[in-house]
Image (cartoon, coloured by chain):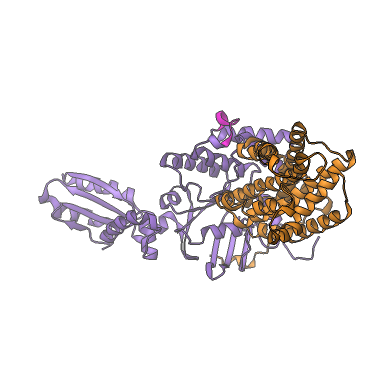
Chain colours: A orange, B purple
Amino acid sequence: MSATSKTLVAVLVPRPPVLGRVRSGLADVATLTKRELLIWLRNPSYLFFTFIQPVMFVLLFRYVFGGAIPVKVPGGYVSFLMPGIVAQTAAFASFGTAIALARQIQKGVIDRFRAMPMARSAVLLGRLAADTVRLVVTVLIIVGVGYAVGFRFQNGVVPAVLMVLLAVGFGVVICTVSGFVGLAIKDEESVGSFGLVWLFPLTFVSSAFVPVLSMPGWLQAFAKNQPVTTVIDEMRSLALGGPLGLHAWQSALWLAGIVAIFVPLAVRAYRRAS
Amino acid sequence: MSATPGAATWDGPAILVEDVHKAFGEVQALCGVDLVAERGQVLGLLGPNGAGKTTAVKILTTLIEPDRGRALVEGRDVVCSPAAVREIIGLAGQSTAIQEELTGRENLEIMGRLYHLDPATRRRRSSELLERFELADAADRPAKGYSGGMQRRLDLALSLVSRPAVLFLDEPTSGLDPRSRLGMWEVIQELVSMGTTLLLTTQYLEEADELADEIVVVDRGRVIAAGTVQELKNRVGGDVIEFEVVDRQHLTQAAEAVSVLSELRPTVDAEAARVAIRVGASGSASLVETVRRLDALGIRTEDLAVRRPSLDDVFLALTGHGTEEDNGAKLRSRRGRSAGHRA
């Protein structure tokens, strides 16, 4: 059936200039960011993770566990708790990234986007931009709830803003891990069941809710040196006053390391997701 | 712009696939597939689960690259210029581009944005498509609440936002109830009447029969037959005219009377007083002739009809096995029947 077609030469369609491609790529990222935010606002379970769950955690820890946990920071347990719970919530917010990506792969949405004339990176970049917006909102809500139950920044405005930015940055970095998890597992239900398995130990076996020194020795070794603790300790220093240098370096290295490993993994999983 | 040699214009077929191979690990999904679809034609890719249909669609829509061979859409090579291919194609079917939290209109408008249509065109196109696919009433409700049929229609609409020159529908009606399937067929037929080139994959033999101009039957990564629906049916032996004679005494006379319609002898079932004769592709004409001849002799008949072989029969004749496991029961019964009339 193709005896005559051997002679047919494929047509050459010149690619548009680089500048035009970049501009339309940015427009695609903006469109997809808007799309993801719209979806987020319409989905009750995403909203639960953003608004209800963090408020619940603040109240539970503040009033249920708070009295039983002795801490040596100015302002008492609520001051100790807030930086921890902000980071924990930022990390848990990444769960939505994993769920959404797994769902889009499973349904074929990603395949459809990939068969369209748009920048291939736009899907992941749009996702990340929307997640950043989501994280800013989440972190601000928790800080607000914290203020309502007695938390106060004690170190001035600039360190307070830096703490919020660090929390958001930390959340975005954890989103790249979750993004990889979602893209690699590709199944909404499995992600729903197992997507939090690594987040629980990572956030709870840290300095988020209790002083690390209260844990048994073998657990302290992990808790002291893992990224969530370094980030939270830095956030605490920013919020309450304290040494900034060492934890800042450690946090930066950890976050850079996670990005360096998980962004390429996520991109690879995305490319292979068809 | 680049040194790659290439023609400036294309006057070949809309879809051209030559000797395409694709393996996933050990599994050879496609082994040397050739396909041609002329502009405006509906090419049906028919085969059971795992035959390689979806792999072929994924290669043609630039989602995966072939290991060997070439695939061109409107002359654009899917490997050398995938971006140019994506400009002119639409894809719908098994995958869905619908985001359930968004309304039908929002889904369409976002698609329009991603194709860089200007706001006015975007809005007009969305309304037009909602109207045409009978979704206007549900346009501003979240797609979550749509029925299966409505979701498929919306999905098809999404793939048409950019007015693609070539459309790929990968099993567009799988999982739909019979009524929604008929609705989809109507929509697809309307689309085709407007000149869109369409490649359609299906496991439903009836669907290929209904929609496709030309059918390629694939099985285990190979093309095992190609041709028009009629040509494929003829390979199984074509139409059969069957009737029952009311008065048994006329049985031999009746068989004699119709025997001129075919080079093959009619088969006579004396017990059931039935006569059957294979007449090739000329079912309708032969039916008229049968009635005329029997009438002239004053022979009264009952249950006079042309029986056309179904594509199930074709598939069985070509492969010797059924189309799909969960169609097993249906096929077993068909197998019995087709074996009967082939004998």
Q: Residue at x 39, y 60 (%)?
A: B315
Is residue B77 at least partly visible in the picture? no
Write down the quadrant of residue B317 in the picture: bottom left
Q: Residue A217 in the image: x percent, y percent?
A: 70, 60
Segment tinted magenta in the rendering: B135-143
Q: Left or right: B69 with respect to B207?
A: right
Q: Residue at x 49, y 40 (%)?
A: B148
Q: Please state which of residues B50 and A93 is positioned toward the viewer in this rendering.
A: A93
Residue sitting at the far top: B137
**How many numbered tags mark residues here?**
0
User: Is B45 rendered above or below residue B131?
Assistant: below
Q: Residue A109 in the image: x percent, y percent?
A: 61, 48
Residue sitting at the far left: B249
Q: Residue B311 in the image: x percent, y percent?
A: 39, 55
Q: Please state which of residues A61 and B281 is positioned toward the viewer in this rendering.
A: A61
Q: Left or right: B231 with respect to B295?
A: right
Is residue A52 at least partly visible in the picture? yes
Residue sitting at the far bottom: B26
Q: Please state which of residues B161 and B99 is positioned toward the viewer in this rendering.
A: B99
Q: Residue B59 in the image: x percent, y percent?
A: 60, 60
User: Is B56 rendered above or below residue A78?
Assistant: below
Q: Quadrant of the C terminus of chain A?
A: bottom right
Q: Within the magenta stretch, is there residue B136? A: yes
